[in-house]
Amino acid sequence: MIINLPKIIGHRGVKDLAPENTISSLEESVKHNLKWIEVDVKISKDNIPFLLHDDLLDRTTSGKGYPYNYLYKEILELDAGSWFDKKFNNVYPPTLEEVLNFCSNRIGVNIELKPNKGKEKENVDAISSLIKKKKLNVQYYFSSFDYYSLELMRNKMPNSNLGYLVDNFDEEKILALIIQDCINLKCFSIGFSIDLISQKLIKSCKEENLKVVVYSDSNIEYTNALKLWTMGVESIFIDNPTNYKSVLDN
């Protein structure tokens, strides 16, 4: 499956407008006419893939500790919205299956493999098993900061599209090694923190036919996005699409 990435991708849904990694956040993405969203996926104690960014449940849910200590039926009962705004007190952490059903015939999805340490294989096994059994009517690709997870997914789903995520490096030699990792994994994209981006870096990636995507800890403003696209960045992960109407309407 050939992936044509749009200029912008919603980050954890659109995490500045609704609780991240929830159906409410995905609904906001659709309202704002986004073509793609990104979500983070971990597994429960009973190996159900569901949406969660952090290692622990504490920040974005009413739960405590590691998610792999909870059955999904227990995670389903958690409040995943009140931390953002009290009006979201009925929001819960959805399963990946529910998300894929929501996205079907509607919006593309970047599935970030975000396993707890030591759960990499179980995470990939559960996600790949789910996707293999579903008849998906949605474009998707996998990404991860974790090389091992991408390697496992390449073996499980040889024809899948993969993107390698990078949050730091400090030498040109290291960049060359990162690009070689992408080649070894047959990645189609590479994602960098906005703090790392340079014209030289983009050129090095493009020379190996890698699409460059950019993310940030905070929302990337439209004026910065224009500069990044001009430099050759393919896609930008954003938290709030309000000022991107001209792009989204095209």
Image: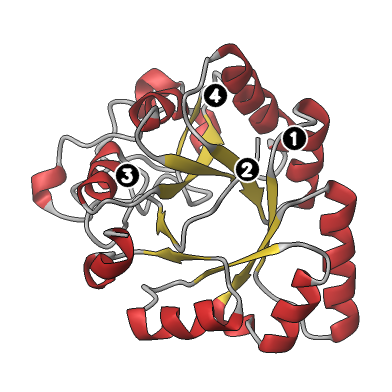
Of labels 4 and 2, earlier in sequence is 4
In the visual, does 216 lie left or right of 120?
left
Dot 2 and dot 3 residues touching (CB under 8 Å): no
Mark 2 to mark 3 CA distance (whole Å): 24 Å
How far, Cα to Cα, is label 4 from label 1?
20 Å
* Residue 208 left/right relative to 237: right
Tell me how far mark 1 sits from mark 2, CA to CA. Answer: 8 Å
* Residue underneath mark 4: 45
Left or right: residue 86 versus residue 26 is: left
State if disc 1 and disc 4 touch (CB < 8 Å): no
Q: Nearer the viewer, mark 3 or mark 1?
A: 1
SS under mark 1: helix
Q: Quadrant of residue 213?
A: bottom right
The reply to whether discs 4 and 2 touch (Cβ–Cβ < 8 Å) is: no
Q: Relative to the observer, which residue lies in front, 228 or 97?
A: 228
The residue positioned 52% from the left and 22% from the top of the image is 48
